[in-house]
Amino acid sequence: MQREVFSFPTGPKGSPFLPSCIALLAALQIHHPMAAQFRVIGPGQPVVVTMGEDAVLPCHLLPPMSAESMEVRWLRPGFSSYVHLYRGGQDQDGQQMPAYRGRTQLVKDDLSDGSVSLRIRSVRRSDHGLYTCFVQSNDSSGDALLELQVTGPYFPWAVALAVILPLVVLLGSFCLWRQHRVTAKYEAMKEFAGA
């Protein structure tokens, strides 16, 4: 039984052709690296904010890389306009959703490290819901979905009322009991004096 041995095709001078091509492609790859690929990462849990406070929706690129020359688009699923757009190194508000106009800004402190977080000022009940952070470079793009949960406002007077109301009821009950006791004592003394 004869076995067939596989060999690479040879070039015009008898040298293996395929290994030469692989070496050439590897050399070209060194001079023309692949475009930087990234993933867009959001938080693993909902962002919870009390109504009226500022919210920061965290989002970043992995591996960390500068997003200064990228397009960053914050969207609400189901809406045609955007919540916030950063393009060409500037915030753009031309077609921003009216409900967010003047209330959003891309947090640029760590933009050079891949942070593309969004700040929403004075959060409203209508801000509650899902958001998409979409980032696009010349060669790559990605997105992350995150949730903003808006809770009811904290009212200090509600806590004060919860503490004071039982005290008022207790004090009122004591006063009624005391009044009843004094009245009973007075009636007893009146009865004793009249007898």
Image: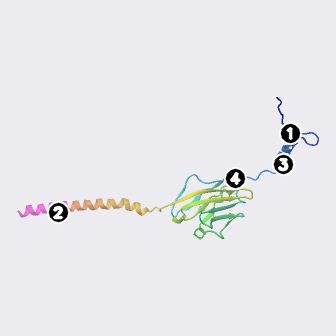
* Nearer to the camera, 69 or 26: 26
How far apart are the two marked residues, 2 and 1, measured between alpha carbons?
117 Å
How far apart are the two marked residues, 4 and 3, measured between alpha carbons?
23 Å
Q: Give the quarter of the image for residue 13.
A: top right
Q: Residue at x 35, y 61 (%)?
A: 164
Q: Nearer the viewer, mark 4 or mark 2?
A: 4
Circle 1 residue: 8
Residue 183's label in the rendered image is 2
Disc 1: CA contacts within 10 A as few (<14), some (14-19) or many (>=20): few
Q: Earlier in the sequence, mark 4 or mark 2?
A: 4
Question: Percent position (x, y) of residue 2?
Answer: 83, 30
How far apart are the two marked residues, 4 and 1, measured between alpha carbons?
37 Å
Residue located farthest toward the left when viewing the structure as drawn: 195
Q: Is residue 141 covered in magenta?
A: no
How far apart are the two marked residues, 1 and 3, measured between alpha carbons?
22 Å
Disc 3: CA contacts within 10 A as few (<14), some (14-19) or many (>=20): few
Q: Earlier in the sequence, mark 1 or mark 3?
A: 1
Q: Residue at x 57, y 60 (%)?
A: 130
Q: Amino acid at mark 4?
A: Phe
Q: Amino acid at mark 2?
A: Thr
Residue 28's label in the rendered image is 3
Q: Which residues are magenta?
A: 180-195
> Which quarter of the rendered picture does the N terminus lie within?
top right
Circle 4 residue: 38
Q: Earlier in the sequence, mark 2 or mark 1?
A: 1
Q: Earlier in the sequence, mark 2 or mark 3?
A: 3
Residue located farthest toward the front when viewing the structure as drawn: 1
Q: Residue at x 74, y 56 (%)?
A: 139
